[in-house]
Structures are given as C-alpha cells and as structure tokens.
Amino acid sequence: MKNCLYNYFLLVLFCCVSNVFCVQAQELSVEIVEVKDQKKISFYAINHTKVTKEVFFKVSGNGFRKSSYRPVIKKVPAQQKVLLTVLIPLKNVTPEYTYFHSVENQLQEIHIEMKVDSWKDLEYVIDRGETIIFTKDECAKCEKLAEMLLVNRIKHKVFNISENERYKEFFWNTISKMKRRDVLISSIPIAIVKGELHEGLNLISFVEMLKQ
C-alpha cells in the first residue's frame, strides 16, 4: 500500500513538473527582448521555433511620442530576430511603459502602412474596394482604432497624413473627388470602405460592420 501511494505521489509530481516545463517552453517559443540606449528603446521578437510565427505587440506608457504606442503584427521567421517597434522618449521626461504580446501560427497581412510612389497606385487601392484608414499623429482615437482592427484581425491599409505630405494631399484629393467639402482633418480617423467614406466613427459599430 505504501509503495502504491509513493508511486502515485511520484507520478503526480512528474506531471506537475512536466506541465511547468511545457508552459515555459511555450512562453519561450518567441522571446521579447528590449534594447535600450540614450535615445530610444527597441523591442525585438526572437523566434526560437522551427516555424514562422506571427507576433501581436502592444506598448502602453507615458513619456514617449504618441506614435510609439501603435500596436503591430509582425511575421517572425523561424530562428530569426525581428524588430517590432521603437520607443522614442520625450525630452526632460521620465518614461514609463508596459507591453503585451501574443503569438499565433496563422499568417496574415492585417495592417499595412502604405508606401507607394504614384497617384495611380494610391487611387487604385481605393478603386479596388479595400479598407483604407486615414490617421494622424497625436490622435488617441486613431490609436484605438488601429488596435481594434488588429485585435479583430481586419485587413486594412493606413495613410498617416502626419508622416507623409503626399498622403495629406491624397487625403484632400480623395475628399474632393467624393464632393465632401464639409470634411475636416479634425474628423480623422476617417475610413473608406468599398469606395464609401466613413467619418465621425463609432469605433465599436464600425469594427462590427467590417467583421460582417
């Protein structure tokens, strides 16, 4: 009887230890690494597995440029290291931050910040019926919308008019073509879905519409 109890105890202990090792192995499948210097903090994902992983990464904090808080989804190839994002501290401020990440095997191009060179390419994106989001810096609602689109895995393309003067011109050109002279930059974030303009967004309702 004592031997049975002893063997049972060893079996339970072995299972518990195995579970701990399994959890740790899962957590270390993709490792998040911070690299700090005087001007910035860089976050990298290191994939320790033999398959490509998809990493969702979100930083929250104070004392950095607002654009630093944009959530990102990055593909991290097997056994490789990929830059996720860079935090740029503001001057004369003591920065604070926390971050969250999750890992999936499914690979999708969810969020694309546009980098194109011609008006024809820019107009083609809208004519093709894709979901377009106009954003700007220092826009809390833009940041929240970006996060909701990523979390809900909704494919979209982004034009940040603060970072690219051509995109600001494209914004006004697009609004003019739609004969909407009442639209202002203060209305951003503004979306174009299947050629239809959406402003004054209720983020929850808008995202639910895109999920249908």
Image (cartoon, rainbow, N blue to C red):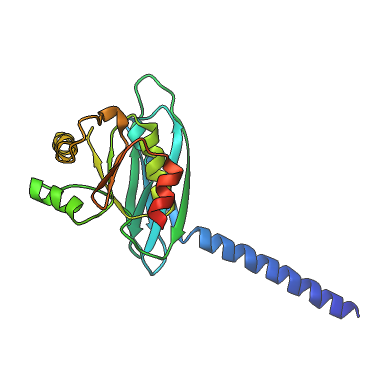
> Residue 81, relative to residue 96: is it above or below?
below
Q: Could you say which quadrant of the image residue 128 lies in?
A: bottom left
Front residue of 197 and 41: 197
Front residue of 98 and 107: 107
135 relative position to 146: left or right: left
Looking at the image, the residue that sits furthest to the right is 1
> Residue 94, relative to residue 86: is it above or below?
above
Front residue of 171 and 10: 171
User: Could you tell me residue 161's position as x and y percent?
Assistant: 22, 35
- For the point 23% across and 50% down, the residue is 195
Say which quadrant the C terminus sits in.
bottom left
Say which quadrant the N terminus sits in.
bottom right
Q: Is residue 52 at least partly visible in the picture?
A: yes
User: Could you tell me residue 103's position as x and y percent?
Assistant: 45, 58
> Residue 169, relative to residue 81: is it above or below?
above
Q: Could you say which quadrant of the image residue 201 lies in?
A: top left
Q: Is residue 150 at least partly visible in the picture?
A: no
